[in-house]
């Protein structure tokens, strides 16, 4: 299960039925949960003084794909799933069933809830706070410095069920409220209200999310998406969602 | 030719004069054409149930640069050339002389013609259809979900000789017609007509491509680019193009 | 210091106290300065005919993080520091204390001054010229072809102390003058004057940089940033800056 070419510290705590692929390195200060798979060419628990000695913890039943790098000092709940070449730095704490797409770059010191889905090539600046059931699409950037370069950090906060479409930038300190939708290629400078759509650069209010119709001929609203999109969520979560409607 | 540290399945079908670099992994369900080079730290034929058992086929005389990942179930014609850290998922089918720049991320289930050139860090969503002789420049995203997240997929289609300049986003279902030019940093929501330039967010018609002059003092038009730009194309292709002018 | 799984050419010139990590490859035509660390899974001195035989030179006290690729024929002053998965191609010449963030892609034939800071996932097209003390933030693209694809190359030039905020595109031949600030998500088509802010697509003059106040309650200006931001610069450099104010 541990490939003979993997280099695994004897100090690392490796759970039962863990698979570690060829040419992957696991450093000292790492705890990996049961039934987790780490593919080839990864570097897990990269040592950093910024971790203040705290370990990297990967929850059980996770899958980390090839060429990924995880630093010491971050923690992930069960069923973390990544694409290839993901980087996560120190002191980020994510809940369960977190997905990070290929090339994702999480700069550390972030708080991330449960069932958050990041697609490919997303940059999450330090001090971001993400709730539960969030979707972020390719090439989105969450910033934190209001007048770079400076020592001031104002993390972005994103609330439950919010969606940020591809190639958008969220400026420092902005709050994207519950169920909001940021349209593709937007630059968001100010807070986005619950269940509203913003678009443009700078992003402006367009309409309520409920105005967007599903392109399946049903005439139903596309939002809140949790009414119709359930792939990948456990039945008990979906049943809870559906009580609302 | 096969580096001693490469890990190559005995089930993989490797052509004549193939070179495989250090620390590269070749899985079972792979067919590699003659005279192909695969550099270091790659993972070739990554197993996936979504491939339905179909093999990864790499045409002859190809070059895959380091740290790239190709899944089972995609096929490439002769002379595929990649930059570093490219990812291609399942069931994408590309013609000959396909180039994918560094960090390219092709999500699978795409159809790609001959002599297509993708530069660095391009994201191609599922169900994209690309014709022949297309150019796409760095950090472009082709999307497919009209109201994410949902189960609806509307792939982008791009026709022969079209050009998409850097940092543009093409929204779901959009068709970029033959010879069109999408200017840099545009967000394209609706179809783009043949031999026209669009720009902005949302992208709007600017003028015919023939209005753009070459910045070489000649006074000639910069488009159709196939009139003056021939580097990397075989003579018979160029002669065919020039018959038109 | 040289990991037993690293593959190091006997022709490479390796300084004193150099550390080379697991699964890293160092090719023939490479000169590495004293006290430099190269992490795991890198490829250093990738051979290329475009280098015309000139070596890759890495200055002393540098740190190259994992999965990075450096081609033959580029040179770096002392204290180069990179993130993970950086690519630098041929014939780029950078001064001292150059920082390149994770996923950075420098296409070669660039001139880069001292103390330049590139954050994550920046694309630098060929023929760019960067002065000293420049900051570029994530997902910025510097282009060079005014009517792609063509054989004309018009590199971008960026002067000392200029700042380009996240997700901006700089079009071919543009000059960003000393101390200017390009706001996030801008597309810059024309030159930017000294100590001014531009924003939008196309980017337009907004006001003088001195109008931007620090969000620390002090009432001070945020720019010129060198008045208040000194982290990572040597004392003698900072003292020189402060003489101006």
Image: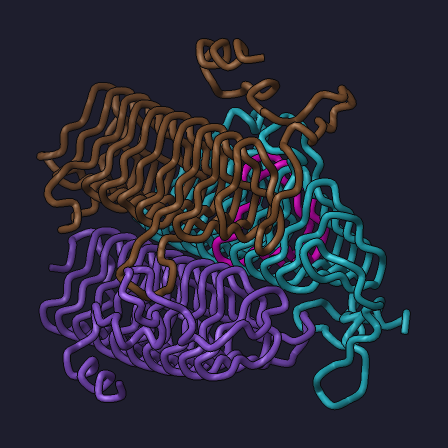
Chain colours: A purple, B brown, C cyan
In this picture, residue C188 sits left or right of residue A53:
right
Q: Is residue C124 magenta?
A: no
In this picture, residue A134 sits left or right of residue C119:
left
In this picture, residue C101 sits left or right of residue B147:
right
Along the line of sight, which residue is nearer the eye, C190 or C195? C190
Q: Position of residue A179 (x, y in %)?
A: 40, 79
Dominant SS in magenta:
loop
Name the residue located 59 percent from the left edge and 18 percent from the top edge. Answer: B227
Q: Which residues are magenta?
A: C89-118
Name the residue located 27 percent from the left edge and 42 percent from the top edge. Answer: B70
Residue B231 against residue C234 in the figure, above or below: above
Q: Is residue C113 magenta?
A: yes
Along the line of sight, which residue is nearer the eye, A187 or C119? A187
Do we see residue C12 in this rendering?
Answer: no
Looking at the figure, which quarter contains the C terminus of chain A? bottom left
For the view shown, which residue lies furthest in the right direction?
C244
């Amino acid at each position: 299960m541990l490939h003979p070419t993997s280099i695994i510290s004897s100090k690392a705590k490796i759970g039962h039925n863990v698979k570690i692929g060829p040419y992957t390195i696991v450093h000292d200060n790492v705890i990996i949960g049961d039934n987790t798979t780490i593919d080839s060419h990864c570097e897990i628990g990269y040592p950093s003084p910024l971790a203040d000695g705290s370990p990297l913890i990967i929850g059980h039943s996770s899958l980390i794909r090839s060429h990924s790098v995880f630093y010491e000092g971050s923690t992930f709940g069960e069923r973390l799933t990544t694409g290839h070449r993901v980087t996560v730095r120190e002191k980020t704490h994510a809940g369960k069933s977190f997905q990070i797409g290929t090339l994702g770059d999480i700069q550390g010191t972030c708080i991330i809830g449960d069932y958050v889905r990041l697609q490919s090539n997303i940059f999450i600046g330090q001090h971001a706070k993400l709730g539960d059931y969030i979707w972020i699409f390719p090439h989105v950037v969450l910033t934190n410095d209001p007048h770079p370069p400076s020592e001031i950090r104002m993390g972005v906060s994103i609330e439950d069920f919010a969606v940020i479409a591809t190639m958008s930038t969220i400026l420092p300190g902005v709050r994207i409220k519950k169920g909001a939708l940021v349209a593709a290629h937007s630059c968001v400078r100010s807070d986005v209200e619950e269940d509203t759509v913003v678009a443009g650069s700078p992003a402006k209010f367009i309409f309520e999310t409920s105005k967007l119709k599903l392109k399946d001929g049903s005439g139903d609203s596309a939002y809140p998406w949790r009414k119709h999109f359930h792939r990948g969520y456990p039945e008990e979560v979906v049943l809870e969602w559906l009580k609302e409607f």
